[in-house]
Amino acid sequence: MQSAISISLSSPSPIARFDVINTSNACLPTPRSLRFCGLRGEAFQSTSSFKTSSFRSARLNSRSSLNKVFAALNSNGATSSSSSSGFDYDLVIIGAGVGGHGAALHAVEKGLKTAIIEGDVVGGTCVNRGCVPSKALLAVSGRMRELQNEQHMKSFGLQVAAAGYDRQGVADHANNLAAKIRGNLTNSLKAIGVDILTGVGTILGPQKLKYGKGGSGDTIITAKDIIIATGSVPFVPKGIEVDGKSVITSDHALKLEFIPEWIAIVGSGYIGLEFSDVYTALGSEVTFIEALDQLMPGFDPEIGKLAQRVLINPRKIDYHTGVFASKITPAKDGKPVQIELIDAKTKEPKDTLEVDAALIATGRAPFTEGLGLENINVQTQRGFVPVDERMRVIDANGKLVPNLYCIGDANGKMMLAHAASAQGISVIEQVSGKDHVLNHLSIPAACFTHPEISFVGLTEPQAREKGEKEGFEISIAKTSFKANTKALAENEGEGLAKLIYRPDNGEILGVHIFGMHAADLIHEASNAIAMGTRLQDIKFAVHAHPTLSEILDELFKSAKVKVSTSSAVAQPVPV
């Protein structure tokens, strides 16, 4: 099973928002957006407000303000206190993945002199071996699946010849996308003056670390604050021999070096599901091996059952549940891959499979070795760096380590790239003097199968457990994609949106979507949770017609809340 996402159920503080600057009347150049991979798309802007009677004054003030911002960016926070306080940097980040990148950009916005240490390549797992190249492969599988569906195409009045593909061309598409985004991230850091330090970062003591290839040639630097953002690597259970050819992890699979006729996928979480979508679209037969008693154990049970009916049952996929792959031997000397299965509970032998390839999709493990945590009395827990709700590192005695933070997969709170970025931004708010606690229940997750699956907040069983414990009722609302005009126009009526909420106060506890563009639709719900918006308020929001967004509109409107509007409605403006 893929590693579960762990989230805190404690009452969170509202997520901090960022000032948006109006320069529309200032005739000023707008810098290009420097954020990628789900990070904020806004560029750096000034905060002048304009009045008709003082347009010229406001314009000059805004230009001056923007020039100061650019000066700070170009000098990498040279106006900060790092030099006067005796540190080489205000902030050093170990790891240049999406989390480290997001933290670095926000740090420079805050005027902090910043460096980022990377021992591999900028972009980390997401860009180079994860969400970016996998989405390129899934884009291909989606188009192949549509072109291969003769009935679907005929419903549009289209006639399409047999669809084919070039394996190397598909692989090149994924590799080229990763290279492009990696270049974008690198250039965005350089453009604002972040120092990219090449090598392995090791903490030597409080506010002191080194980087390099290891040995006497390493460079020692100091920093007022340090962020660990080293990410994760594929987790391979004991007894499985990975050769990178016939027994592979997601790192190898993304290279698409061959398309096996029959591939076993160990684990039916996000990683396994997405690769099953790719492989079956390209002609492979797939066998899932899942340790738990049901497929897709991390999803809301109702959504999981529907997804299985659409994504698993009609395709060339079979599965074994409640079993472990106790031993996997790579193909050798003309023999296929050997997989020995045992009962997950009794550990008794169950079966032996012979397949062309096996993909190990059992989740990810934190990459925290070699960080020098022993130098600051920090002990990892199952490899994860222990942190509090503010991402502050906790030592072996349960005390906070001053000026040290850990974000992303390395802390295990929520192993998603955009969660790492959000945690990094939250840390920068704190080191800049503004207290901030990230609400992890507001962070959405998505599986980019065809159709897609997305969710935010609690599943129905989690919500019912919370309600019983805290003494409140929960209610469920649902709406079907079959009732949506845009979905029907696309002949994509297969789908469901589910809302879990408190009828006594209108609080949104969770939203789960299975259907076309579910990954895009979920953000209205996640933002509502983040901002504390209640159902009795959001039901007044207007959605363009006909759009898929109306699925959420109908979902929110169908909720039966026992209280009236919880906040004042803005007065209408005559136009």
Image: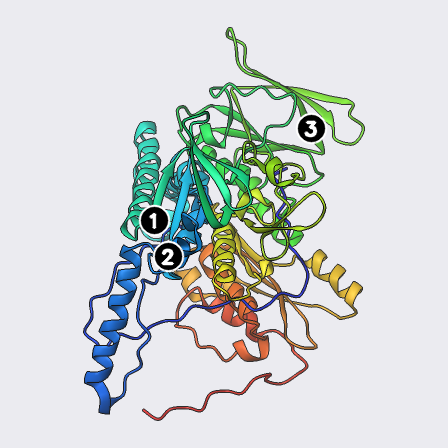
Q: Position of residue 531 (x, y in %)?
A: 53, 71
Question: In the figure, residue 456 lies in which quadrant?
Answer: bottom right
Q: Nearer the viewer, residue 153 or 354?
A: 354
Residue type indicated by callout 1: Val
Which label was assigned to residue 324?
Answer: 3
Give percent across and percent down for residue 315: 52, 37
Name the residue beneath numbered marker 2: 108
- Residue in the image at 78% along x and 23% along y: 348
On the image, which quarter does residue 124 sit in?
top left
> For mark 2, does the 10 Å Cα neighbourhood hold few (<14), some (14 to 19), or many (20 or more) residues?
many
The front one of 529 and 80 is 80
Q: Which of marks 1 and 3 is in front?
A: 1
How far apart marks 1 and 2 lie (CA) works out to: 8 Å
Badge 3 crowding class, 10 Å Cα cut-off, few under 14, some 14 to 19, many 20 or more, is many
Question: In this picture, is 483 found above or below 455?
Answer: below
Q: What residue type is labelled 3?
A: Phe
Side of 238 relative to 166 (left or right): right
Between discs 2 and 3, the one toward the N terminus: 2
Q: What kind of residue is marked 2?
A: Val
Question: Where's residue 344, x and y in %?
Answer: 74, 31
User: Between marks 1 and 3, how big is the CA–CA gap?
Assistant: 46 Å
- SS category of the residue bearing label 1: loop
| Residue at the spot 50% in from the left edge and 87% down from the top edge | 569
